[in-house]
Image (cartoon, rainbow, N blue to C red):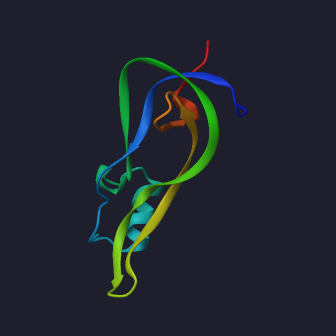
Amino acid sequence: MKLGDKVRFQKELFRKGYSYSGSALSDKEAKNMNENGLLPEAYTRYSVYENKKPLTGIVCGKRTIKFKGYSRYIGYEEGYDFVTFEYKQVYLVAVGMSAFRRVPEEFIITE
């Protein structure tokens, strides 16, 4: 996939309005759960949104996003830090002039 390619997709990722904080699990326990596919949905920073009909857009970029992890309070001056377990590569697809849609390669419809 190259910049400027026209693509169709029906599903996309959108960022939740919050990230899970105050994890009761240690880093090692959470990483083990993630490797075994047992990490709860609350640890995912993005949700999948399915549009009613397929959308068409133009690929405008490629990014690596922090997909799974949790927020941890470090201290008063530092604030919160997001501990990341899994990254995901997404394409930035422009459908209109207002925003980009985050679309992983597996969500792109090929015909």
Q: Position of residue 94 (x, y in %)?
A: 54, 32
Q: Quadrant of residue 8?
A: top right
Side (left or right) of 54 relative to 19: right
Examine the rendered structure and indicate whether residue 109 appears above or below residue 88.
above
Quadrant position of the N terminus in the picture = top right
Q: Position of residue 38 (x, y in %)?
A: 36, 52
Q: Residue furthest top?
A: 111
Side (left or right) of 92 relative to 19: right
The residue closer to the viewer here, 26 or 43, is 43
Quadrant position of the C terminus in the picture = top right
Q: Residue furthest front?
A: 97
Which residue is depicted at the point 50% across and 23% down?
9
Which residue is depicted at the point 38% across and 53% down?
45
Which residue is depicted at the point 71% across and 34% down?
3
Q: Position of residue 80 (x, y in %)?
A: 36, 75
Q: Position of residue 5 (x, y in %)?
A: 68, 26
The residue closer to the viewer here, 28 or 106, is 106
The residue closer to the viewer here, 82 or 92, is 92
Side (left or right) of 108 relative to 72: right
- Number of numbered markers: 0
Side (left or right) of 9 relative to 15: right
Q: Quadrant of residue 110?
A: top right
Q: Quadrant of residue 24?
A: bottom left
